[in-house]
Image (tube, rainbow, N blue to C red):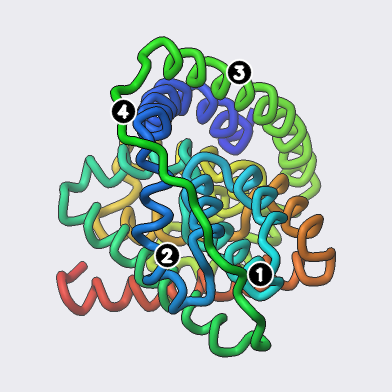
């Protein structure tokens, strides 16, 4: 097996304990009753980028699973709000599995690397939302009504049960996709497609992003599962293939890069095939441009 297939299956093993911890934390916040309060608290702020509290819930779910979060936007009445919410979910929000691995990668570089990477992702999300709010055709935002449950002590048993079922659901969804992606990428590699893509992307990855050519493998893996790419990056960090700046840039671009297969399908289902594919293309172009800019800013400010 090549390092692409190995990276795919190693990602499943690596991500399970991290995903378990995240689901426990997310389940606790749900059980406490904080999530609805978060929607109300951020409603006024997020109206400035064309979305309301209703779509904020979808954005929060994007930190769990982007595909599931995208499907929940079907309840939004405004097409403009729905478009912005789906775009932001797909663009720079890491899903739970990738978030855990990103934290593991940046944790090896120190707290400063963590702050730089996530500040960059937050900034591009805000700017992207503001730009979309300006260029998209005006649409009437739906009214926002949210019932606020009382803050309460969480039920430990209920949290554990929810965590268990979410892990089972993740395995049922992810394992078949990992297998299909491994077969596809293996055949693609053997047919010479990977080498051709490396030649095409080589100058961009090396000269613009400042990353080793092996990062092309990680970018390809994002099309299968983003956490698989993060798992491969973590392995590269462990063996010393990526330095401080490269680790930050790698985390940022793989987070912003093309959504996974399942999320692209969900985008096409909610917005139409043409719109969904167009959004994926725009996201890819934007990710290369912004990650390259970040690379050069870091080189000029903190050095190579």
Task: Check the picture and name the quadrant holding the N terminus.
Answer: top right
Labels 4 and 1: the sequence-earlier one: 1
| Tag of residue 152 | 4
Mark 2 closeness class: few <14, some 14–19, many ≥20 residues within 10 Å: some
Count up the numbered dots: 4
Mark 3 closeness class: few <14, some 14–19, many ≥20 residues within 10 Å: few
Q: Nearer the viewer, mark 2 or mark 4?
A: 4
Instruction: Please name whichever residue, 22 or 299, is drawn nearer the observer in this view of the structure.
Output: 22
**Disc 2 secondary structure class:** helix
**Drawn side of residue 3 relative to residue 291, left or right:** right
Residue holding disc 2? 43
Residue holding disc 3? 168
- Percent x, y for residue 251? 39, 54
Residue holding disc 1? 83
Q: Is residue 207 visible?
A: no
Tell me the distance, in whole angstroms, between the alpha carbons under discs 3 and 4: 27 Å
Up/down of 110 relative to 4, above or below: below
Instruction: Please name whichever residue, 252 or 44, is drawn nearer the observer in this view of the structure.
Output: 44
Tell me the distance, in whole angstroms, between the alpha carbons under discs 2 and 3: 33 Å
- Percent x, y for residue 99? 41, 43
Q: Nearer the viewer, mark 2 or mark 1?
A: 2
**Disc 3 secondary structure class:** helix
- Percent x, y for residue 20? 43, 22
Mark 1 closeness class: few <14, some 14–19, many ≥20 residues within 10 Å: many
**Disc 4 secondary structure class:** loop
Task: Check the picture and name the quadrant holding the C terminus.
Answer: bottom left
């Amino acid at each position: 097996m090549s390092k692409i297939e190995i990276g795919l299956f190693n990602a499943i093993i690596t991500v399970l304990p991290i995903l378990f911890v995240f689901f426990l934390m997310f389940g606790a916040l749900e059980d406490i009753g904080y999530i609805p309060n978060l929607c109300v608290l951020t409603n006024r702020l997020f109206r400035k980028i064309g979305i309301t509290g209703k779509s904020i819930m979808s954005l929060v779910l994007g930190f769990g699973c982007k595909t599931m979060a995208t499907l929940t936007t079907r309840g939004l009445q405004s097409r403009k709000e729905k478009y912005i919410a789906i775009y932001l979910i797909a663009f720079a929000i890491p899903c739970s599995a990738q978030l855990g691995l990103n934290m593991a990668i940046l944790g090896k570089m120190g707290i400063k690397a963590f702050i730089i990477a996530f500040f960059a992702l937050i900034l591009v999300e805000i700017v992207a939302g503001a730009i979309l709010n300006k260029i998209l055709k005006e649409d009437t935002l739906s009214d926002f009504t949210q019932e606020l449950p009382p803050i309460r002590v969480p039920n430990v048993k209920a949290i554990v049960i929810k965590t268990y079922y979410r892990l089972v659901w993740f395995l049922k969804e992810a394992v078949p996709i990992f297998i299909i992606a491994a077969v596809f990428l293996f055949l693609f590699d053997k047919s010479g497609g990977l080498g051709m893509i490396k030649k095409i992307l080589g100058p961009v990855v090396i000269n613009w992003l400042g990353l080793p050519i092996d990062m092309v493998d990680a970018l390809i893996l994002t099309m299968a599962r983003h956490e698989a790419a993060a798992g491969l990056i973590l392995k590269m960090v462990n063996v010393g293939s990526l330095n401080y700046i490269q680790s930050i840039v790698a985390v940022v671009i793989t987070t912003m890069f093309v959504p996974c297969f399942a999320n692209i399908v969900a985008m096409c289902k909610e917005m139409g095939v043409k719109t969904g594919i167009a959004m994926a293309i725009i996201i890819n172009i934007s990710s290369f441009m912004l990650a390259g800019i970040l690379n050069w800013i870091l080189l000029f400010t903190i050095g190579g």
